Image (cartoon, rainbow, N blue to C red):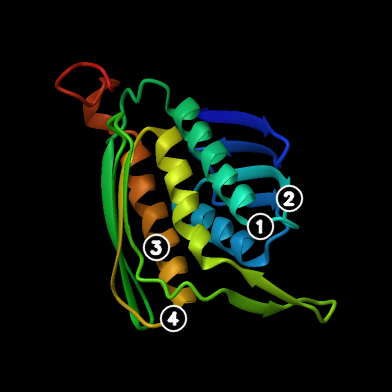
Amino acid sequence: MREATVERNTKETQIKLTLNLDGSGKCDVKNPIGFFEHMLEAFCKHGMFDLSGSISGDLEVDQHHLIEDTGIVLGQCFEKALGNCAGIFRSGCFLYPMDETLCRAAVDFGGRPFLICEAQLTGIPLVSLGDDGKEYNFQTDCFEDFWQGFVANAKCNLHLDVLRGRSDHHKMEGLFKAAARAIRAATEIDARRNGAVPSTKGVIV
């Protein structure tokens, strides 16, 4: 089983995640941010990854710490579960249409972290209404922070592009789904590779 558990505790956030790369798409993470929970659920469902655990942090300060640190821990889970990347496809890409929005993701687990994120977001927070009648926001400027934390720790390079679109909700959700499908393609086992490391160097660095 290609699984990993990573725990990160700081004065700002407390995060523990368990990842199974060969899962069924189940997400069971205690998450205090509604829209972020929705994004992680979409990522797992479309990537066929199982993810469990809990995340909490200083939301009275900002959402940035918790969202970025979750990306860090998730990236560490992928890096740990993949090990030396032997036998995987290594790279993948996917186009995901979501209503008026068309999103593209391309990833390479080649050991050199780099993020290009052209999400074309407005920067205006998304507003939702909770069961308690209170308004809750999602800081859209934290979207890129999550993926920056992910790529730096998964040691991959990732390109995220919105080719067209209007709704920030659709742009972010479409990119999470496109990224999930691209990452799924990259991390699946290539039967023809017979367990070899997918690099002409013989090692992923």
Residue at 35%, 71% (x, y): give it: 120
Amino acid type of the residue that numbered disc 3 sits on in the rendered structure:
Leu
Q: Is residue 94 left or right of residue 152?
A: left
Distance (Cα) linking label 1 and label 4: 23 Å
Q: Are marks 2 and 1 in contact (CB under 8 Å)?
A: yes
Residue at 58%, 75% (x, y): give it: 126
Distance (Cα) linking label 2 and label 3: 26 Å
Q: In the structure shown, which secondary structural element does the residue marked by tag 2 occupy?
A: loop
Distance (Cα) linking label 4 and label 2: 28 Å
- Mark 4 neighbour class, 10 Å CA radius: few under 14, some 14 to 19, many 20 or more: some
Residue 38 position, x and y percent, is 60, 64
> Which of the two discs, 1 and 3, labels the residue nearer the N terminus?
1
Residue at image mark 1: 62
Distance (Cα) linking label 3 and label 4: 12 Å
> Which of the two discs, 1 and 4, labels the residue nearer the N terminus?
1
Residue 58 is labelled as 2
Distance (Cα) linking label 2 and label 1: 7 Å
Q: Quadrant of residue 114?
A: top left
